[in-house]
């Protein structure tokens, strides 16, 4: 695959998604202004795909960064591809469009390029982002995901979003939507955890067979947020095989990890708040991994998840994520 920094993939609705995106999530302990500064750097060094979400709590910051780079002439709005996400407490059909409108207002954007359902499992509707009972357990809700999808379709019809997709869905959950009577728009993408220890090949093959783009987050490992991640978990960028291959190509381990998934056809989200690494992470288009490197990296897969879905562990349908 001959790729460059501005390479795109045409999605099943005809719109294009840049093959590399900038992730803006940060653990709660980090000030939101970091996402704003990092997003400006990312746009300056060439990223055109910005990935954010309502639940990150920083859409206003990311929106400001985008507008500043549009105002100063670095980019035009149409050059940028913005992904937002419908949070799990807004899945009842009547809450979908208001949630989108709130995000657009925070971002000060007229439309999103891509709006995706953040999780297949729903929590109690309302403004409490993590509704808990007296025992500290998440309160779940059970809107039919197909009804949520119809509300997403209406947002697309209204011109508020150009494309709609899903995130953290397994094959069965995607098929629920694909097989829905009266389906008007297929999901254009499925955004999932994806790295050398969880390469998602089965899900990638299924999504590809359906014309659905796989978008990978945590490609460089994870933010290692104490609230979500086992602190004893392996560190992707310290993997000896990855390091050896990186030395062979005179690249960083992060660059090789990103390049690996680009060559598999995955859209990669790279996340860093360090200006040097933000720039390095997009410099992945001047080398190519040969088949033997791809095979070595593929052999590292162990179906290991950083995002353990602790929030969902009490859900009757858990573990939904263990199926591809």
Image (tube, grey):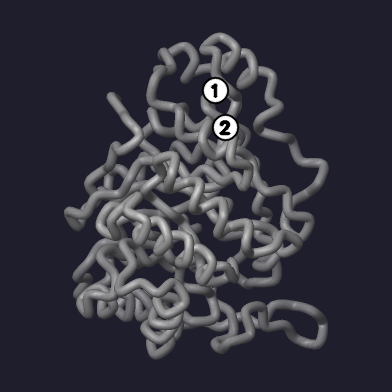
Residue 145, image x and y in percent? 41, 75
Question: Which quadrant is home to the N terminus?
Answer: top left
| Mark 2 or mark 1: whose residue is earlier in sequence | 2
User: Disc 1 on helix, strand or loop?
Assistant: helix
At 66% across and 30% down in the image, what residue appears? 237
245 relative to 165 in the view: left or right: right
Q: Quadrant location of residue 209?
A: top left
- Whether 140 is drawn above or below 289: the answer is below
In-front residue for pair 264/159? 159
Pointer 2 residue: 196
Residue 84, image x and y in percent? 43, 65
At 47% across and 77% down in the image, what residue appears? 106
Q: Quadrant location of residue 291?
A: top left
Per the model, the C-alpha gap separating discs 2 and 1 is 6 Å
- Whether 69 is drawn above or below 139: the answer is above
At 60% across and 25% down in the image, what residue appears? 253
Pointer 1 residue: 297
Residue 218, image x and y in percent? 58, 45
At 49% across and 40% down in the image, what residue appears? 200
Name, please, the residue furthest toward the top: 248
135 relative to 288 in the view: left or right: right
Does the image show residue 36?
A: yes
Q: Quadrant location of residue 149?
A: bottom left
Disc 1 packing (10 Å; few <14; some 14–19; many ≥20):
many
In-front residue for pair 315/235? 235
Disc 2 packing (10 Å; few <14; some 14–19; many ≥20):
many
Residue 234, image x and y in percent? 74, 35
């Amino acid at each position: 695959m001959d790729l460059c920094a501005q390479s795109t993939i045409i999605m099943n609705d005809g719109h294009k998604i840049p093959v590399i995106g900038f992730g803006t999530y940060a653990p709660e302990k980090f000030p939101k202004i970091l996402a704003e500064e990092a997003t400006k750097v990312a746009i300056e060094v060439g990223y055109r795909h910005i990935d954010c979400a309502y639940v990150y709590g920083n859409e206003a910051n990311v929106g400001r960064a985008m507008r500043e780079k549009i105002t100063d002439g670095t980019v035009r709005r149409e050059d940028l591809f913005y992904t937002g996400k419908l949070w799990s407490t807004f899945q009842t059909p009547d809450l979908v469009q208001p949630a989108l409108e709130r995000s657009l207002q925070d971002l000060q954007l007229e439309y999103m390029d891509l709006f995706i359902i953040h999780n297949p499992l729903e929590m109690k509707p309302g403004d409490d982002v993590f509704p808990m009972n007296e025992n500290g357990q998440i309160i779940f809700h059970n809107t039919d995901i197909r009804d949520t999808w119809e509300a997403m379709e209406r947002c697309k019809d209204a011109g508020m979003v150009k494309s709609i997709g899903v995130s953290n869905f397994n094959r069965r959950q995607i098929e629920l939507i694909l097989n829905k009577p009266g389906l008007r728009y297929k999901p254009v993408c499925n955004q999932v955890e994806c790295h050398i220890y969880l390469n998602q090949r089965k899900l990638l093959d299924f999504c590809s067979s359906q014309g659905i783009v796989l978008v990978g987050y945590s490609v460089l490992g994870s933010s290692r947020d104490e609230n979500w991640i086992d602190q004893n978990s392996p560190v992707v960028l310290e993997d000896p095989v990855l390091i050896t291959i990186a030395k062979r190509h005179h690249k960083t381990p992060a660059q090789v990890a990103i390049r690996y998934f680009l060559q598999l056809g995955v859209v990669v989200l790279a996340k860093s708040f360090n200006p040097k690494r933000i720039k390095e992470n997009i410099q992945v288009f001047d080398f190519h991994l040969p088949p033997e490197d791809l095979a070595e990296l593929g052999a590292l897969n162990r179906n290991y998840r950083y995002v353990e879905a602790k929030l969902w562990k009490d859900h009757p349908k858990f573990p939904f994520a263990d199926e591809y």
